[in-house]
Image (cartoon, rainbow, N blue to C red):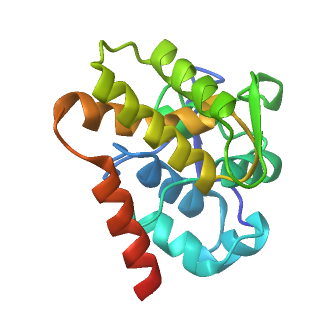
Amino acid sequence: MKKSKILEDETSPTIKVSLIGDTLETENDRFALVVRHFFDNQADSAKQLEVGESYVSQLISGKSKISGELIKKVAAALETVNLDWLLRGRGEMIYSEPAERQTINGPTIDVQGEPTQSQIDQLTDYTLTVQPAELTARQRLMLQLACAHVLKENQGSHPLEYLSMATRAYLRLIVRFPDFNLVTLFDLEGALRLKL
């Protein structure tokens, strides 16, 4: 792991990060900056975060989404990284003091195998609490399908906040394109996995 490339403003004890030339619109962009900032290279980041090098490469290129499990590993390995910044782009990348560090707390869901209807309803309700939307019965059914898909793909125990990041993306798609059928999208995703 390399030393942080941080700039300290002489007039202020606040630590700032040089972001010249960096576009940080997505969590993948922000993860790429974390890798460049804290690690010698992608291989070093994969080793320190205990993930595969190809996964790090896919994250940086935007081909894979950041998982709740990866967020936990980043939090454990890099105490000064602001998780709210990494996930949502809020605040600064680095806390000036490790004591400022926050974690995303809150209710969790533990999925082992197929998600239950209760788990699907819990994630659906949480998603609509965080991102309110008026849905038709069909749209709500599509959101529940998306929640079931996200739960099935994220086995283990995860905070609802992590899981709802994915379901909120589906919710935006459902609201924007009310006639879109998510079943088709999930079938296509499954077919692509079989070909890989």
Relative to 46, is 174 above or below?
above
For the N terminus, the quadrant is bottom right
Residue 132 placement (x, y as % from top left): 39, 12
Could you tell me if residue 8 is visible in this image? Answer: no
- Counting the numbered discs, the total is 0
Residue 54 placement (x, y as % from top left): 56, 80
Residue 162 placement (x, y as % from top left): 61, 37
Q: Residue at x 49, y 64 (%)?
A: 59
Relative to 139, is 87 above or below?
below
Q: Residue at x 43, y 70 (%)?
A: 190
Q: Residue at x 46, y 83 (%)?
A: 194
* Relative to 108, 43 lies left or right: left
Residue that lies at the very extreme toward the bottom in this rendered image: 195
* Relative to 194, 151 lies left or right: right
* Relative to 89, 41 lies left or right: right
For the C terminus, the quadrant is bottom left
Residue 101 placement (x, y as % from top left): 76, 28
Could you tell me if residue 186 is visible in this image? Answer: yes
Q: Quadrant of residue 138?
A: top left
Relative to 54, is 148 above or below?
above
Residue nearest the observer in this picture, 188 or 104: 188
Residue nearest the observer in this picture, 47 or 19: 47
Q: Residue at x 68, y 28 (%)?
A: 118
